[in-house]
Amino acid sequence: MFICIYSIYIIFCLLQITLYTIVAISFNEDLNQMKNKDLQEIYFRFLNLVRSVEELPSFPKLDATEMELLNEVASRWKKGERLLVSDAIAKREIGSPATLHARLKQLRDKDMVSYVIETDGRKKYIEPTENALKYFSQISNCMLEATAK
């Protein structure tokens, strides 16, 4: 009799643990879905904010290649490194050398990058200008504003 009651108690405890596990997993899935929805909302708010900022006349109009190239220049600059013009033009994953050369010229014409020539006149380094840093600040403000709501 004692063994039977003890067995029933053990089965009851196992069922209770299983039920708690199922409830916990369900709760975590609901929580993850809620987090994913919140993150999606933040992302779409960010996209809408960026689109509205891009429509401002003072905001520079950049195509995808220009943005990627500018991001590469700024990322290197932020790390304390500088990108050579020849290295930028060799970035085949962004575009062909002719395209990259044209986009660098356009970024320079838009005052988003400048060339720095040091002692060896054969090497030109690319650096972001003050306008490029303002551009990144505006995008950063959109990120902050999207997460604040």
Image (cartoon, rainbow, N blue to C red):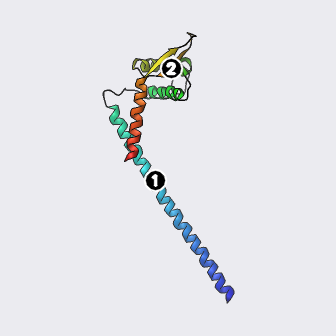
Image coords of residue 10 (percent x, y): 64, 78
* Numbered disc 1: secondary structure: helix
Looking at the picture, tell me which residue is in the foreground, 133 or 30.
133
Looking at the picture, tell me which residue is in the foreground, 114 or 93.
114
Image coords of residue 8 (percent x, y): 62, 82
Mark 2 sits on what residue? Answer: 126
Image coords of residue 49 (percent x, y): 35, 39
Looking at the picture, tell me which residue is in the foreground, 128 or 99.
128
Image coords of residue 142 (percent x, y): 38, 38
Q: Amino acid at mark 2?
A: Ile
Q: Amino acid at mark 1?
A: Lys
Instruction: Give the CA distance from mark 1 to mark 2.
Output: 40 Å
Query: 10 Å neighbourhood of mark 2: few (<14), some, or many (≥20)?
Result: many
- Nearer the observer: mark 1 or 2; the answer is 2
Mark 1 sits on what residue? Answer: 35
> What residue do we see at 56% from left, 25% from top?
81
Query: 10 Å neighbourhood of mark 1: few (<14), some, or many (≥20)?
Result: few
- Tell me which corner region of the image, top left, top right, bottom left or bottom right, holds residue 34: bottom left
